[in-house]
Image (cartoon, grey):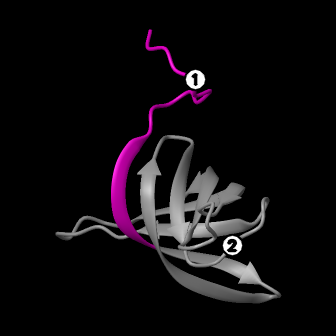
Amino acid sequence: MLESNDNRNFMRMSINADAKVTFDKSGELESLNAVCLDLSAEGLSLKVPVELEKGQQLTAEIVSAGGVPSLKATAEVVHSQRPEDNSGDYILGCRITSMD
């Protein structure tokens, strides 16, 4: 068995793929361009230009190339981090709640 300080049940796969994130903001749907940094069977991390709160529900669509259908998942934000110098995008850790 592999040892790790990470408590995940599934290994993460680094993908760095373009994604579209859609979420409800004050009763209206808002969409953002994002980058999916990694993906596992239970979650994903996203790089986005704005902070989303813990518990926020979102839909992430990971764009595929070459005619392969996009992956679409509904997820919940588990944590949001910004670089220590407060520059750059936010990194969201999300738990997948369903796959479309």
- Which mark is on residue 94? none
Instruction: Point out the residue furthest to the front here.
Output: 85
* Residue found at x 34% / y 64%: 17
The type of residue carrying mark 1 is: Asn
The answer to whether the residue labelled 1 contacts the one labelled 2, judged by CB atoms less than 8 Å apart, is no
Which of the 4 quarters of the picture holds residue 56?
Answer: bottom right
Where the N terminus falls, by quadrant? Answer: top left
Q: Is residue 51 above or below residue 99?
A: below
**Residue 96: where, in percent of width, then height?**
61, 51
Q: How dense is the environment of label 1, judged by Cα within 10 Å: few (below 14), some, or many (20 and up)?
A: few
Q: Which residues are magenta?
A: 1-19
* Residue found at x 63% / y 64%: 82
Residue, disc 1:
5
**Residue 18: where, in percent of width, then height?**
37, 71
Q: How dense is the environment of label 2, judged by Cα within 10 Å: few (below 14), some, or many (20 and up)?
A: some
Whether residue 100 can be seen here: no
Residue, disc 2:
51
Instruction: Point out the residue furthest to the bottom here.
Output: 28
The type of residue carrying mark 2 is: Glu
Instruction: Point out the residue furthest to the top here.
Output: 1
For this rendering, which residue is in front, 80 or 28?
80
Could you tell me which secondary element the residue under label 2 belongs to?
loop
For marks 1 and 2, give the CA distance. Answer: 26 Å
Q: Is residue 5 above or below residue 66?
A: above
Whether residue 48 can be seen here: yes
